């Protein structure tokens, strides 16, 4: 059971070392650790099983996208931050929404009080979305949107902004997170029970496979699972298992694997145990390729190749001596790059306590630029391939993932495992074990339980102006006043009617969005048909 | 005072508002339980009204409010206000989460006994709650 500390105190250990996730590390790795069949298990970048990378030339052909997660206040503040980041050299957009938007509440709902614009940008309607991308041609940039239970609605908003700009849906490139299984497991942002939520995910995969060939309708995520306290093995296993579950649902819908699998994307954490992370990414690619080909019958290489976005680990940041976080983020970003990420967000040094200031996020972006343009690591694909240590770690984490797959299968699959609190309990146990290690100083966190500074100056942090909540409520009132109320009613009624059938819900959602139905109104309408969700937590 | 059977300390660990970050709250809940206390974990998405109701119904000695969404200056005062309004003022109120240093004095003035920010040790939190709850028991002459 995972509540025993993974490492004994330093003084008692002979020479035991493990990764932060508990994988034992030997005193030396050499040729005796070399993989048995490297051509098969490692191969080449751009070729099955893609261990070394999804593309032949990797960063020589094209650098990873520098894509900083951003959003706060109302759409005006966030649009300004989007422009700032683009002006400073980021190459893709990433949108953070506030808690009310993530949970499907309009900004003037009583549950939204005090929460508007705090963790991200407030978006209630298409009017907000249009202003969010003011001055940003959607045909010329890719955008990621971190939103899950209401994802279909935000995608509809984005498509309509594109339409207004003269960019048809099929030309829009980007990603929407949509990954609802990991919400029940870790991020905990839900609107509906599991089955209707899964139906919406499949609707989005289906609709995008037909209408938006450049778009990723889901970003199958491990980041949040890891932030909740999981080990790297759990992050890898639960993420891939979630991915297989979406594949199965899409196949059950009657879709052809090679029509939708190429547009599935992933999102992993880039944590502080350097080599473990690199091994994790490489194992992820190999496992996904094998399963897509051998279990799910994919024929196209594009279906088998796992592509991912990475974010450096928020939980690794400390409030104490925040400049140290620049170092942490740099190491984590380097691991993601050496692991072959396609897209990267680097955290800012002030993010242990608040959203980033402009100064802090500029340093975070520069971190990526220094890695890309000064360090030389982008000059060859998978530079650590063939390292006895890295290949062994890759094999071991792959094996650990398959053990978890078997346990989840025994429980009846991932949805059933979630209902039984299996991944949630694994995560809670791992988080508790880690905290005990820190409390007992078996695991050192610089500035927190060692190398502590007695007097620390206060760091200026970003404050969200509470007046923005009023401002957003006024925007919402203006939208409601301007729109054709009866068109909205009709569209919402149609949405409810459709939700009770098996039709794809993207078209009625788009029509309701076009009429300026708000996100909250659409979610409430769907909840009348689907119900809501309450978890039975384990700790 | 006679040596009575020590009354078990009862703690509500609560997640106010829409914030879904429950890693810390769960760890504290487990640590308090391991320390021999009776722990009621409310789960997520609790309104201040629901939290106050739980504190009263469970006859809690202490309530730990965990909040990482930035909405603490709206939600914490509301919980404290509701507890006062219902005559349960001596319950120990502690707050944990991403609370900027500048907000701490105002929270304390409202009656929050302690704010535990990132990097706080588990034992420190458990000890604080234990001693605060024991004081409350003594005051009540338990």
Image: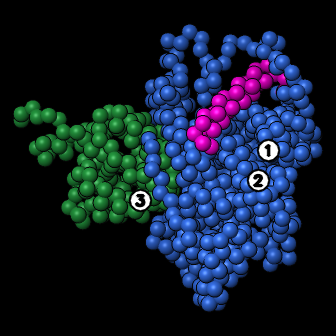
Label 3 SS: loop
Q: Tell me the chain of label 3.
A: B
Measuring from the top left, give residue A351's x and y in whole percent.
59, 48
The range drawn in magenta is: A385-413
Residue A399 colored magenta? Answer: yes
For the point 65% across and 71% down, which residue is it? A501
Q: Tell me the chain of label 2.
A: A
Q: Tell me the chain of label 1.
A: A
What chain is the blue one? A
Provide the residue designation for mark 3: B46
Measuring from the top left, give residue A532's x and y in whole percent.
51, 63
What chain is the green one? B
Q: Residue A180 vs residue A33: left or right?
A: left
Question: Which comes sooner in the sequence, label 2 or label 1?
Answer: 2
Q: On screen, A531 above or below A444?
A: below
Q: Are marks 2 and 1 in contact (CB under 8 Å)?
A: yes
Q: Residue B30 or A272: which is nearer the viewer?
A: B30
For disc 3, the neighbor class at 10 Å (few under 14, some 14 to 19, many from 20) is some
For the point 72% across and 50% down, which residue is it? A248
Measuring from the top left, give residue A308's x and y in whole percent.
77, 46
For the point 68% across and 68% down, which residue is it? A502
Q: Are marks 1 and 3 in contact (CB under 8 Å)?
A: no
Per the model, the C-alpha gap separating discs 2 and 1 is: 9 Å
Residue A368 colored magenta? Answer: no
Label 2 SS: helix
Provide the residue designation for mark 1: A296
Per the model, the C-alpha gap separating discs 3 and 2 is: 38 Å
Provide the residue designation for mark 2: A251
């Amino acid at each position: 059971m995972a509540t025993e500390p993974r490492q004994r105190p330093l003084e008692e250990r002979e020479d035991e070392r493990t990764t932060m996730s508990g994988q034992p590390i030997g005193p030396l790795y050499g040729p005796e650790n070399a993989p048995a069949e490297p051509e098969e298990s490692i191969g080449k970048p751009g070729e099955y099983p893609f261990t070394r990378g999804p593309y032949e030339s990797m960063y020589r052909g094209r650098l990873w996208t520098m894509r900083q997660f951003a959003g706060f206040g109302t759409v005006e503040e966030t649009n300004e931050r989007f422009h700032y980041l683009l002006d400073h050299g980021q190459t893709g957009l990433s949108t953070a929404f506030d808690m009310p938007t993530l949970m499907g509440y309009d900004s003037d709902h009583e549950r939204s009080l005090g929460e508007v614009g705090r963790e991200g940008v407030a978006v209630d309607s298409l009017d907000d979305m249009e202003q969010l991308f003011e001055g940003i041609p959607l045909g010329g940039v890719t955008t990621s949107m971190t939103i899950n239970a209401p994802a279909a609605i935000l995608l509809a908003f984005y498509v309509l902004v594109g339409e207004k700009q003269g960019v048809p849906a099929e030309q829009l490139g980007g990603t929407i997170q949509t990954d609802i299984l990991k919400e029940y497991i870790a991020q905990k942002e839900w609107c509906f029970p599991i089955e209707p939520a899964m139906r919406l995910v499949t609707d989005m995969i289906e609709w995008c496979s037909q209408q938006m060939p450049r778009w990723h309708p889901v970003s199958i995520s491990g980041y949040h699972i890891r932030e909740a306290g999981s080990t790297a093995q759990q992050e890898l296993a639960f993420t891939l298992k979630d991915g297989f579950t979406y594949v199965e649902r899409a196949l059950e819908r009657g879709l052809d694997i090679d029509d939708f699998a190429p547009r599935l994307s992933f999102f992993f954490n880039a944590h502080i145990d350097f080599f473990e992370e690199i091994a994790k990414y490489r194992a992820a690619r190999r496992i996904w390729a094998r399963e897509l080909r051998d279990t799910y019958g994919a024929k196209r290489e594009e279906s088998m190749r796992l592509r991912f976005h990475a974010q450096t680990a928020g939980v690794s940041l400390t409030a104490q001596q925040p400049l140290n976080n620049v170092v942490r983020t740099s190491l984590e970003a380097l691991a993601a790059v050496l692991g072959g990420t396609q897209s990267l967000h680097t955290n800012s040094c002030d993010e242990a306590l608040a959203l980033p200031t402009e100064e802090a996020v500029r340093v975070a972006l520069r971190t990526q630029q220094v890695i890309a343009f000064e360090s030389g690591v982008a000059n060859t694909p998978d530079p650590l391939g063939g390292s006895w240590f890295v290949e062994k770690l890759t094999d071991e984490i792959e094996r650990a993932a398959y053990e978890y797959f078997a346990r989840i299968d025994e429980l009846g699959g991932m949805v059933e495992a979630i209902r039984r609190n299996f991944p949630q309990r694994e995560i809670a146990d791992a988080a508790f074990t880690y905290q005990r290690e820190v409390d007992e100083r078996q695991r050192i966190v610089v500035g927190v339980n060692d190398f502590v500074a007695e007097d620390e100056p206060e760091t200026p942090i970003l404050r969200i102006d509470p007046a923005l909540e009023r401002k957003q409520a006024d925007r919402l009132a203006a939208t409601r006043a301007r729109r054709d109320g009866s068109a909205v009613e009709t569209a919402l009624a149609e949405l409810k009617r459709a939700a009770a059938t098996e039709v794809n819900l993207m078209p009625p959602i788009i029509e309701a969005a076009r009429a300026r139905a708000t996100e909250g109104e659409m979610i409430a309408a769907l909840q009348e048909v689907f119900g809501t969700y309450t978890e039975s937590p384990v700790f | 005072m006679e040596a009575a059977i020590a009354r078990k300390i009862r703690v509500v660990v609560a997640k106010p508002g829409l914030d879904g970050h429950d890693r810390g709250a769960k760890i504290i809940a487990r640590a308090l339980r391991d320390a021999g206390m009776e722990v009621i974990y409310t789960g997520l998405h609790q309104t201040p009204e629901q939290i106050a109701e739980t504190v009263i119904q469970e006859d809690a000695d202490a309530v730990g409010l965990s909040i990482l969404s930035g909405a603490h200056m709206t939600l914490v005062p509301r919980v404290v206000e509701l507890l006062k309004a219902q005559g349960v003022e001596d319950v120990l109120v502690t707050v944990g989460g991403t609370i900027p240093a500048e907000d701490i004095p105002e929270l304390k003035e409202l009656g929050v006994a302690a704010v535990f920010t990132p990097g706080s040790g588990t034992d420190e939190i458990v000890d604080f709650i234990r001693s605060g709850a024991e004081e409350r028991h003594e005051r009540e002459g338990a």
